[in-house]
Image: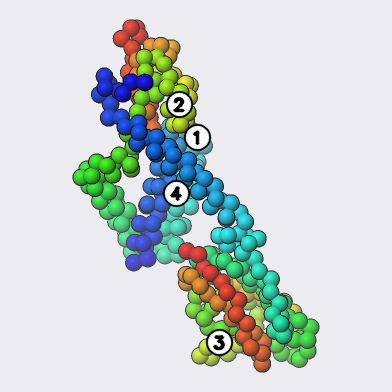
Amino acid sequence: VSDGKRLELDEDIHQQQQVWVIERISWALMALVIGAAATGFLGHGAFSNRRVSPVDAGYTIDYHRLERHQSQSIFIVQLDEEALQGDVVRLRLGNSFLRKAEITRIEPEPDSVELDADLVTYSFNAAAAGVITFHFIPTGYGNAALDIGLDGRPLQSHPQFVLP
Amino acid sequence: MESVIRAIFIYFFLLIVFRVSGRRTLSEMTTFDLVLVLILSETTESALVGNDYSMTNSVVLILTLVSINILLSMLKLRFTGLEKWMDGRPFLIVENGKCIKYRMAKARVDEGDIMEAARKLHGLERMDQIKYAVLERGGLISIVPADNSN
């Protein structure tokens, strides 16, 4: 192979070989990122999905451990039978979550909403509140705790991380 | 400020992705490549703009992207090493009618690509009519015909 002198070519095959190595490594990294996305390591997938039933909390929650900024998402709170005994169910949500997310819809709609310094309390008709779905859009980045609890019981913290 | 950061991130992300995808990736567009470019631009738009569709945001994004481009072109002029890594260097893939297979394989170029360029540029019919074929920095193949190619 000529060094290209006769052609007056500004060739640097040594550097080009380094570029090819970097290219191959980068392709492997791209495949890793795609694999991570497919399995939920970048949110909204098997790795990210969580179903938790905290002891004595009276509910089971399905949520995403990893969220994506400005991406529509949900968490679902399924209330235990014993939590639905009265006429009204009061569900409390910590403000730390609301500072990093905008709730766009709640199904079923709460009968009333009370705002406090540290939390929001939603009141639902117990007959319709077996499964409550919160639709929200993460508006912040980084760590976000989904603090949630029934009235009269301690808030349970469910950690989330919002990816850019 | 977020718009500026978004624009800088997307600019360098695209720069790196297209650099490591190889110089032949979109150098000669097929119909599907064109569709791919359109999809990429649509995807990039949402990452760039986010939920801010204001004219102010568009102005900030455009100015940021163009400014980075100007800055990088100035830096490339001043630091040739940077240019070498960002744009690469042309290299031979055919010499005196002989394909340099190793380089062609690494650059994802086959004999068909070379003959296509030879036909288009010089109306050449055979590989032995090519003195040099060079894979240029932009991914195009340039052909120097052999002296006796006619």
SS for callout 1: helix
Residue of label 3? A119
Name the amino acid type tagged 3. Answer: Leu
Work out whether disc 4 and disc 3 sit on a shared chain.
Answer: no
Is B81 left, or right, of B21 in this rendering? left
The C terminus of chain B lies in which quarter of the figure?
A: top left
Name the amino acid type tagged 4. Answer: Ser
Residue in front for this viewpoint, B71 or A3:
A3
Residue of label 2? B102
Determine which quarter of the picture holds residue A72.
Answer: bottom right
Q: Residue at x 31, y 23 (%)?
A: A3
Q: Which mark is residue B41?
A: 4
The image's colouring method is rainbow
Q: Residue at x 64, y 88 (%)?
A: A154
Q: Residues within 10 Å of mark 4 (few under 14, many from 20)?
A: few
What's the distance in space between the residues labelled 4 and 1, CA to CA?
16 Å
Work out whether disc 2 and disc 1 sit on a shared chain.
Answer: yes
Name the amino acid type tagged 2. Answer: Tyr
